[in-house]
Amino acid sequence: MMLASIGAVAQQAEDLGTHWVHYSAINTSQLSPQVAGAFGIQRSSSRALLNLAVLRKNEDGLDRPVRARIRVQAVNLAGQRRELELREVVEQDAVYYIASFRIHNEERITFRISVRPEDLDGPAREFSFQQQFFIY
């Protein structure tokens, strides 16, 4: 469960009713060389990593990871848009979606996320969050 520790302190969650989406965005220079190497992630102060996990809420309180169709659009303050290419990572009982991308110092990015869990009928759910990145 190497990726579970990525951004654990900065991790946030979005409540989609029947599911949770846990997410974090960190500078890849914060990753240990072992974690970065294991997942083929370039460690750099000018790159960031978005990490998402979708969990189905259960009555027993033990939420279960599920696969999902996820689309992420990153938009900076200048209005430049880019689609982030997510990679699915399966580790034991966990499913994560990660994307690495270039950042600039003090850049504020709005992430627009569309999530459709595989065990949910109907349209995708959408939410957004902002993160500012610093190069050091």
Image: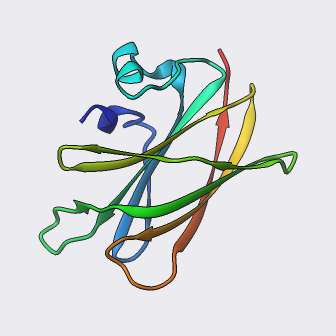
Of 110 and 92, which appears nearest the observer? Answer: 92
Give above or below for 48 relative to 76. Answer: above
* Residue 101 or residue 56, whichever sits in front: 101
Residue visible at 46% across and 85% down? 122
- Kindly identify the residue that appears in the image at 85 percent across and 51 percent down: 79
Residue 14: x and y, percent?
46, 62
Q: Residue at x 42, y 35 (%)?
A: 7
Residue 119, quarter of the rendered image:
bottom left
Q: Is residue 40 left or right of residue 79?
A: left
Image quadrant containing the N terminus: top left
Q: How is the image coloured?
A: rainbow
User: Which of the 4 image quadrants contains residue 109?
Assistant: top right
Q: Is residue 39 left or right of residue 103?
A: left
| Residue that sits furthest to the right in the current view | 78
Q: Residue furthest left?
A: 60
What is the total number of numbered labels drawn onto the structure image? 0
Quadrant location, the C terminus: top right
Q: Is residue 20 left or right of residue 90?
A: right
Q: Residue 32: x percent and y percent?
A: 39, 17
Q: Percent x, y for residue 12?
A: 45, 50
Which image quadrant is residue 71 in? bottom right
- Is 57 above or below relative to 74? below
> In the image as oriented, which residue stretches furthest toward the bottom?
122
Closer to us: 133 or 42: 42
Q: Is residue 30 above or below residue 130?
A: above
In the displayed structure, would residue 100 be above or below residue 19?
A: above
In the shown orientation, is residue 34 left or right of residue 27? Answer: left
Point 46% across, 64% down: residue: 69
